[in-house]
Each structure stands twice: as structure tokens, then as C-alpha cells.
């Protein structure tokens, strides 16, 4: 049982059953949108106090609601913050097309590939800070079995895995034939490279699964335990974790009506098939979280690895779903800077993170120094150090089908509006962003 499951049992949340999934009809049949109200007085501040325009933020609300009415997703949760204060922490629409439960800031979403950065990359940052891991360590120094399928793998470094230049394929559909950690470990060991290490950038789930195995080998603990004790509990991110307990189902947004493998609506079970077959705790997918919790994480990185004390009963606009009686310094500021800047000219990748390029999910107005990531289920997290601005946008756009791509223009529009709302830094389209 994960520590998140233990926390859920202790808190005694009420259990619920799955809702049936209904495919959305025309736009007028989409779930009723509501911009909601902050759950507690003081959760959001007056935008003017952080040099943001309330009228532009209102356009952000209307844009989201219009997209949901056009079936971009059943609902969404949003957090926008600047200078360590929230100007938006709200839910819009419904968790599901069928039960129409309104989304709140505490709605729990399957983060998909945000797991790679919020989870696995952060664990690596902690180990680098502690001097227990070097980015230029070869993988086989920690996982001697890893190069069995290809002698070239003996030269692959941790850094190359994090910037997706190890030469590995993007993914394999192992879930049709494999089940459990040991079976996946054997498959990863036998996997051959598609290119020589360091010669091509291919975004690879297999590479980040390997990084998580390195974390576990160095700590002697499973990934979920490492993150619970080292990241989520110190930050007060009590709604973030793997393998959510069934008692949390009323707050969990269902993902896909899976007709490929599981034959059911996926709710409270990781959407990514390989992560599911692996056991639910994987380096590339498996985390669930809320906009409220991810706002804390975003604030941490914009503050250089440190968050201030806060009182959840009177947060004064600080991201604070759970009280922090004292400041928390999780990661050294130089480590944060190292991991979040572009690693080289070969691609837009930072260490674990991505940076904006071309038609980025961050829109056209987030600066070149920005860093972030997206998740296949419709989740995203972007931070702009030049504006001291972050945006968390969580949707379940794959409900009921992954064929839905209406979230793509929505995500770009939300980030552009958030940037335009900043009044003391003029909008400046990023070169190559159009």
C-alpha cells in the first residue's frame, strides 16, 4: 500500500462507484461550465497586487468555458500564479460527461507524462544535490544488467536519458504481453538502441523508466516512497501520489473509455498502459495530482527550490493546500537552474523538462527561458522565470477518446492570455513561436 493510500484511509474519504461514460453530444450538450469561486477566502489575490490585469484573466475564464462547451474536455482545473501569489485556482466544467460532478481546485487528474518531471526528474535533482548521483554517470554503473541487449548501451549516461538522446526508441507496446516490474526490467535490458548514444533526440518513455530504476537502485526504496518522503510530504502535496485509493474516486477525473486493452472506463487507474501493466508506479507515468498541489510545486521551482511557510486557513494567496509551519528548502537553486535550462542546441530539451520552441504548448508569449511539460491525458505545467509566472492546466481531454485534440489550441490560448495579463512585462512574441 502506498503512503498516499495510507493517508486516504486515515482521512476516511467516502468511497464511490464509477460513473458510466457517455460520449459528449453537440456543444450545447457539454457539461455546464462554471468559473467557480475560490474554495476559501484568501486563496486568490487581487490581480493588480501582482501586476496582472483582471479583465484579461476574465477572458481566460471565458476561453476555457467556450472550449469545454465545444467538447475539448469534460472539465478543467486551472492554477495561475505570479510572484508567489495565486490569481486563479478554480475548476471549470465537470469531471465526466456522464455524472456532471463539478470540477473544483481539489479535483484529481491523471498527470500522465508530467510524472516524468514532477516525479522522476525531481528525485534525480535530490540525488544530484546530495552528491549520490552524477549526470555523467553511465547507466550501467548503477544498473549493470541494463546493456544486455546492445553493447552500445554501456556508454549511455544519465544525462542522455534525461535529455532523450540515449538512442532508445520512444516506447514499445509491451503491455499486450508483459505484466509486472520484473518482466519489464527484462524487456528494458534486452531492448536495443535505435541510434548511437548522443546522436539523435527521441522522446522516450523507456529512458525515463530507466531513470526511475536508477533512483530506486541508489535509494533502496520504490519510487513512490522516495517521492512521498522527499517531495510531496514536505511540501504539503497530500493529494499527489501513485495508486490512488478507491475512496478518492469521487474527486478523480475519469480518462479514456479504453476499447484497446482494458475494456472499461479508466478512473483512478493510470491511463498509460505500460505504467498500468508495470504496476502503476513507473518513472514515465502514474502520478495523480490536483491544480492546488501543482501550484505549490511550480512555486517551488520559481523560488529556486524553496517555498515559504503558509497557513492553509489564511493562505493570503500563497499556494497552500496544506499548512507549512516553516519554510521548506527542497533543492538547491543552482540545481534548479541546471535542470530547467535548455541542455544544448540539438533540441528544446532541458534535463527532464522541455523548453518552448515552434508551436509550443506554452503558446507564443512565454519567454525562451520558460520550462514546462505536458501529459498525454491533457495536462500541462509551464513556468516563465522572466515573468515569475506559472500556469497549471489539468484536463481529461482523452475522455472518452484519445482522438480528441481540441485541447491543443486551448492550451496555447490559455498560456498566451496568462502572459498578456502581466502588465509590467509587455507581450513579446518569442522568436520562432508563430
Image (cartoon, helix red, strand yellow):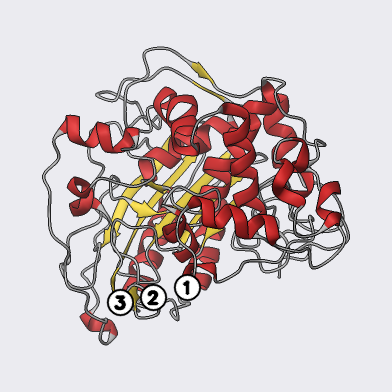
Dot label at residue 263: 3
Quarter holding the C terminus is: bottom right
Mark 3: which secondary structure?
loop
| 218 versus 310 height, above or below | below
State the image quarter where residue 43 is shown: top left
Circle 2 is placed at which residue position?
261
The residue under the point 35% across, 26% down is: 316
Dot label at residue 342: none
Q: Please tell me how crowded label 2 is: few (under 14), some (14-19), or many (20+) other residues with Cα within 10 Å.
A: few
| 185 versus 178 height, above or below | above
> Can residue 78 be seen from the camera position used here?
yes
Marks 3,2: beta carbons within 8 A: yes
Q: Please tell me how crowded label 3 is: few (under 14), some (14-19), or many (20+) other residues with Cα within 10 Å.
A: few
Q: Measure the alpha-carbon separation of dots 3 and 1.
A: 13 Å
State the image quarter where residue 166 is shown: bottom right
Q: Between tags 2 and 1, which lies in front? A: 1
- x and y, in percent, of residue 178 in the image: 49, 65
Which residue is situated farthest in the top direction here?
326
- x and y, in percent, of residue 341 in the image: 75, 42
Dot label at residue 176: 1
Mark 2: which secondary structure?
loop
> Can residue 205 be seen from the camera position used here?
no
Marks 2,1: beta carbons within 8 A: yes
The residue under the point 33% across, 32% down is: 3
The residue under the point 48% across, 33% down is: 227
The one nearer the camera, 215 or 188, is 188
State the image quarter where residue 403 is shown: bottom left
Amino acid at each position: 500500500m502506498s503512503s498516499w493510500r495510507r493517508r486516504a484511509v486515515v482521512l476516511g474519504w467516502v468511497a464511490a462507484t464509477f460513473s458510466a461514460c457517455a460520449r459528449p453530444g453537440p456543444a450545447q450538450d457539454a457539461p455546464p461550465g462554471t468559473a467557480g469561486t475560490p474554495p476559501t477566502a484568501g486563496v486568490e489575490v487581487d490581480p493588480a497586487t501582482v501586476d496582472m490585469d483582471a479583465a484579461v484573466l476574465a477572458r481566460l475564464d471565458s476561453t476555457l468555458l467556450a472550449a469545454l462547451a465545444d467538447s475539448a474536455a469534460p472539465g478543467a482545473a486551472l492554477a495561475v500564479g505570479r510572484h508567489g501569489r495565486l490569481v486563479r485556482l478554480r475548476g471549470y466544467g465537470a469531471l465526466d460527461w456522464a455524472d456532471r460532478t463539478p470540477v473544483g481546485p481539489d479535483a484529481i487528474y491523471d498527470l500522465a507524462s508530467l510524472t516524468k518531471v514532477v516525479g522522476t526528474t525531481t528525485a534525480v535533482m535530490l540525488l544530484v544535490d546530495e552528491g549520490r548521483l552524477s549526470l555523467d554517470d553511465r547507466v550501467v554503473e548503477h544498473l549493470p544488467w541494463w546493456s544486455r541487449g546492445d553493447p552500445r548501451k554501456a556508454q549511455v549516461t544519465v544525462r542522455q536519458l534525461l535529455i532523450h538522446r540515449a538512442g532508445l526508441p520512444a516506447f514499445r507496446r509491451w503491455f499486450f504481453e508483459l505484466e509486472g516490474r520484473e518482466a519489464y526490467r527484462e524487456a528494458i535490458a534486452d531492448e536495443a538502441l535505435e541510434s548511437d548514444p548522443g546522436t539523435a533526440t527521441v522522446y522516450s518513455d523507456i529512458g525515463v523508466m530507466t531513470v526511475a530504476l536508477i533512483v530506486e537502485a541508489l535509494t533502496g526504496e520504490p519510487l513512490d516512497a522516495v517521492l512521498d518522503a522527499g517531495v510531496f510530504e514536505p511540501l504539503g502535496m497530500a493529494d499527489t501520489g501513485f495508486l490512488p485509493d478507491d475512496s478518492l474516486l469521487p474527486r478523480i477525473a475519469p480518462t479514456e473509455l479504453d476499447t484497446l486493452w482494458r475494456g472499461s472506463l479508466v478512473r483512478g487507474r493510470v491511463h498509460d498502459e505500460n505504467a498500468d501493466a508495470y504496476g502503476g508506479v513507473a518513472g514515465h507515468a502514474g502520478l495523480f495530482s490536483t491544480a492546488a498541489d501543482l501550484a505549490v510545486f511550480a512555486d517551488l521551482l520559481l523560488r529556486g527550490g524553496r517555498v515559504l511557510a503558509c497557513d492553509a486557513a489564511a493562505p493570503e494567496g500563497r499556494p497552500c493546500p496544506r499548512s507549512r509551519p516553516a519554510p521548506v528548502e527542497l533543492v538547491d537553486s543552482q540545481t534548479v537552474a541546471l535542470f530547467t535550462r535548455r541542455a544544448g542546441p540539438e533540441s528544446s530539451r532541458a534535463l527532464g523538462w522541455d523548453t518552448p520552441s515552434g508551436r509550443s504548448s506554452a503558446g507564443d508569449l512565454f519567454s525562451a527561458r520558460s520550462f514546462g511539460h505536458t501529459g498525454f491525458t491533457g495536462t500541462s505545467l509551464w513556468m516563465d522565470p522572466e515573468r515569475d509566472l506559472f500556469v497549471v492546466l489539468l484536463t481529461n481531454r482523452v475522455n472518452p477518446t484519445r482522438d480528441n485534440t481540441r485541447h491543443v489550441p486551448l492550451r496555447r490560448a490559455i498560456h498566451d492570455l496568462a502572459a498578456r495579463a502581466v502588465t509590467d512585462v509587455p507581450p513579446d512574441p518569442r522568436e520562432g513561436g508563430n
